[in-house]
Amino acid sequence: CYAQGWGGLYIRANKLAYKMQKAHPGLGIRNRFNVPDCPERVHWDEDFALEVGAPGAYDYGPERCSWLTHHMTNWIGDDGFLHKSDCQIRRHNPDGDAIVINGEVKRKFEENGKKYVEVEQKATTHRGELSAFGTAVAELPSKG
């Protein structure tokens, strides 16, 4: 699960969940079984997501930033070096949305004898809606 690798704030199991609930009794939002549950459940609980005004259960925004970074590092290859990556999320990405990521080289430049490219990236849904965008700067190997 992305949330565990990323270090989600509220998702805990067993003893850690118990300790968090004891330390922060108002944290949990009661689910349909009247059990305090984590606020992050908007990402997998369709009914709760709709209840809070989202278009449905949706992904984690930072996960899309990871996709943009992955897109860029795949493009630059093993010999490239990613120097900078910025990302902005523009909308919810409900379950079922397909995302396509494209990039365009906006600038090539040299600095301190190293060759760089600046790439503008866009993540769009299958409906053509902008979901996220970013800019990355990478050092690329050069033949001279």
Image: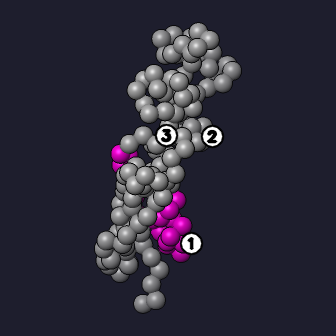
Q: Horizontally, is 75 left or right of 121 in the view? A: right
The residue carrying pointer 3 sits among few (fewer than 14), some (14 to 19) or many (20 or more) residues within 10 Å by Cα, namely some
Q: Name the residue carrying label 3.
A: 94
- Residue at 42% across / 90% down in the picture? 144
Label 2, label 3: how far apart the Cα atoms are:
17 Å
Identity of the residue drawn at 50% across and 62% down: 71
Label whose residue precedes the other's in the sequence (1 or 3): 1
Mark 2 or 1: in front is: 2
State the image quarter where residue 33 is shown: top right
**Place of residue 84 in the rendered image (x, y in percent of width and height, measured from the top left):** 39, 60
Give the answer, above or below, for where 40 lies relative to 115.
Answer: above
Region of the chain picked out in magenta, as a range: 70-90
Amino acid type of the residue that numbered disc 1 sits on in the rendered structure:
Asp
Does 112 sit above or below residue 130?
below
Other residues around mark 2 within 10 Å, as few (<14) / some (14–19) / many (≥20): few
Q: Residue furthest bottom?
A: 144
The Cα atoms of the two marked residues, 2 and 1, are separated by 26 Å
Say what secondary structure mark 3 lies in.
loop
Q: Residue under circle 1?
A: 78
Q: Earlier in the sequence, mark 2 or mark 1?
A: 2
**At 43% from the left edge and 31% from the top edge, which residue is drawn?**
54
**Distance between the Cα atoms at labels 1 and 3?**
33 Å
Name the residue located 37 percent from the left edge and 56 percent from the top edge: 134
Nearer to us in this view, 135 or 32: 32
- Amino acid on which disc 3 is placed: Pro
Q: Position of residue 128 (x, y in %)?
A: 40, 55
Farthest-out residue, right: 14
Question: Is residue 88 one of those drawn in magenta?
Answer: yes
- Res 30 → quadrant: top right
Dot 1 surroundings within 10 Å: few (below 14), some, or many (20 or more)? few
Q: Which mark is residue 1?
A: 2
